[in-house]
Image (spheres, rainbow, N blue to C red):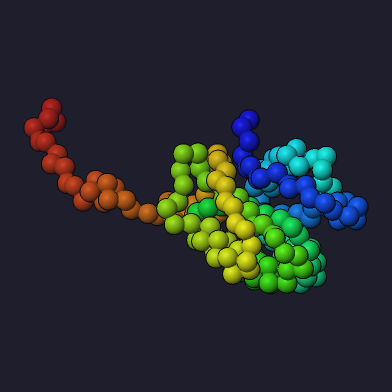
Amino acid sequence: MSTLLLLPPIQKEEESSTEASAPLNIVVVFADTLLAKKSTQIYNELIEQFAPDCVFNASWWKFDRLFQQELFAAATHAAAEADIVMVATHADEDLPEAVKGWIDMALRKAAKPDRLLIALLGAGTGWRPVNSAAEQYLRTAAQDAGMEYLHHWIALPLQMSNGSLKNITNRASAITPLLAEILSHTVAVPHGGIND
């Protein structure tokens, strides 16, 4: 598997022993189990790239956990202390309002400078939305918080890339121009068969 995410190596400067041993805190929020698995691959690549120079602390939060007040507060605190925040979502869906609120609050309460927001955007193989609302929101949030921003497209199986009930319903009821033409086309039924 090729490396999905390359970050520049950590610059080694004259550091005190306490600074050198400070852990790299990472917070990952994700939409579903498939995106959690893909996030784990990225996380493992970060460890491979920076280990043994860094100690990592990571916390993982599923979107639906942010709907609970006490977990929202805990995740916000963790993200405020994080060096890297990763958000794994479907590229063709907007972020839930609770997740947007969490991002705004967590990034604003930053306790550290030089932080990084990584957007992991799941899309079907060979397909990327032209205007991803989630990607635009995350890019703007990072900019507003003064954070570095990276985004990475994650190839998902086609049936998983648009898995929400709303998207399935929208696709099932959509009438494309080709389908509209087919439906409006009338076919003359020939007469004069054997039974005429």
State which quarter of the image contains the C terminus: top left
Q: Residue at x 83, y 39 (%)?
A: 52
- What percent of the width, then of the height, locates residue 26? 76, 54
Q: Residue at x 16, y 42 (%)?
A: 187
Q: Residue at x 24, y 46 (%)?
A: 182
Most distant residue in the top direction: 194
Q: Is residue 147 above or below residue 21?
A: below
Task: Let me know if residue 40 appears in the view.
Answer: no
Q: Is 104 left or right of 157, judged from the image as shown? A: right
State which quarter of the image contains the N terminus: top right
> Which of the two residues, 111 or 166, is positioned nearer the viewer here?
111
> Which of the two residues, 151 or 164, is positioned nearer the viewer here?
151
> Which of the two residues, 9 or 156, is positioned nearer the viewer here?
9
- What percent of the width, then of the height, locates residue 56? 82, 49
Q: Residue at x 79, y 53 (%)?
A: 24
- What percent of the width, then of the height, locates residue 108? 68, 72
Q: How many numbered marks, from 0 up?
A: 0
Q: Is residue 147 above or below residue 155?
A: below
Q: Is 97 left or right of 33, judged from the image as shown? A: left
Task: Let me know if residue 18 appears in the view.
Answer: yes
Q: Is residue 8 above or below residue 94?
A: above
- Dividing the picture into quadrants, the one containing residue 81 is bottom right
Q: Is 133 left or right of 4, judged from the image as shown? A: left
> Which of the two residues, 105 or 63, is positioned nearer the viewer here?
105
- What percent of the width, then of the height, locates residue 162? 52, 49
Most distant residue in the front direction: 14
